[in-house]
Image: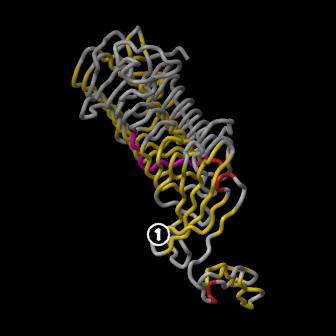
Amino acid sequence: QNLISHLIISNSSGIDVFYPKATFGSYESFKNNNVKFWYPRDFYGDMSNCIAFTAWDSTDYYHGNYVIGGSTNYGSGSGVCFYRNDGGVGHDGGVIGGFTPYRCGESGVKTYQNEVNGISQRCYNLRFIDINPIETYYDGVDLNADYGTPTERQHDYTLAQYAWNNLPTNHIVSNIQAYKTHGVGIFGDGSTGFYRDIYASYSRGAGIFIKGSGKNFKNLTSIQNNAANTPGENQITLDGANIIDGVNIINYTQPTGLAIFAPNSTVTNLNAPSVPSSSINIGNIEGLVVGNLIHVQPNLANQTSAVYLNVVNTSVASKREDTIKIGPGASEVTRYVISGSSPRLTMRENHGDFGSVNIAFSGTVLPDEAVPDANSYAVYWDGTNLTALINHGGVLTRQKLTT
């Protein structure tokens, strides 16, 4: 554990390190710009981070630092760790090119949180593209800036400017495939940023856990996460108000906790076969939901939620259902069909919390084919007469209910 072979590159710029190797070793780039580690291989870490870009005693930000492709193995720290790097408008810096951290003692790739020596080490505007963490002891990719109990940041944005976990980190994160991490597959926070093509499978903790608001997510996939079956652990948690397009949740067995917890976001294109509605908490759902059996649980914090089923098979009638919260412990449900391209009310349940059901009548005389099912009926107005068209065992009769 105490064997160390440590190479430090200090106060330099424009250095390329090709095919770095290590046996119980590590590389540190200290207060440098434009240092690139290309394709690390045969790399077995020591008690620290395998590759780190550090700035322990400086209030400057550093940029242009990369790890490109390759892999690292083991080590007590992270595969790659960034301290006080800011890539600026061009997002100049990060990890790209198919990097694989394997069985790191901490995270596969990490941006350091909070302070060191009284100076914020948080990072901004980096890119993390094509990363494949495998069996890391903590998180596959950890892009948090704030961690723990909120305390005033030093040499950084104040809490008055940005709330805890809501810094404008603004990272670009794409094509992350985390597998069997001991902690969270992909972990992060911040008030801006773009996440695309994020896959997490068989993590013992959450698959995807991103705090903060104002981010864009595209194509998130969770496969059998919370493998430790920890109560209260969700497979996907996006607790802020974000834009989320494309969520796939695949579970062969349903663990405890929710499949997705995104109570303040609108999700389009949710695909969650065999996931019960009680395991889905989303602010709003829009777009295509694929499956022959679809369960939807509206977010109970909303006053009104609507479900539209516009099926691909045109032989099946499209329909809509609204659930409206009308008071403590009470809700009203209205059911519609789509008729003439517009919703048409067919039933209203518990209006005014009276425990009653209101059923719509047809305003025109119904033909015989309007009641095709045996032992059923429909009600219509025939002038001033309310009339029932009754199908009794296949025999149709008409019965006036009022005159």
Return the x and y of residue 208 as percentages of the image width and height: 52, 40
- Assign the C terminus to one quadrant of the image: bottom right
Instruction: Residue 221: say if magenta.
Output: yes
- Which picture quadrant has residue 390? bottom right
| Count of residue discs | 1
Q: Residues within 10 Å of mark 1 (few under 14, many from 20)?
A: few
Left or right of 342? Residue 202 is right
Quarter placement of the N terminus: top right
Does the magenta portion include 151? no
Most foreground residue, 374 or 3: 374
| Residue ranking furthest to the right | 393
Please, is residue 39 above or below residue 252 in the view? above
**Is residue 205 shown left or right of residue 13?**
right
Q: Is residue 361 left or right of residue 59?
A: right
Residue sitting nearer the eye, 93 or 325: 325
Residue 120 in the image: above or below residue 281: above
Q: Secondary structure at mark 1?
A: strand
- Residue 83 point in image, percent of width and height: 37, 21
* Rendering coords of residue 172 (x, y %): 35, 38
Residue that mark 1 sits on: 342
Stretch in magenta: 215-224
Q: Residue, x 34% and y 9% (percent of image)? A: 57
Q: Nearer the viewer, residue 254 or 76?
A: 254
* Residue type beneath disc 1: Ser
Q: Main secondary structure of the magenta part?
A: strand
Question: In the rendered image of this protein, does residue 159 appear above or below residue 74?
Answer: above
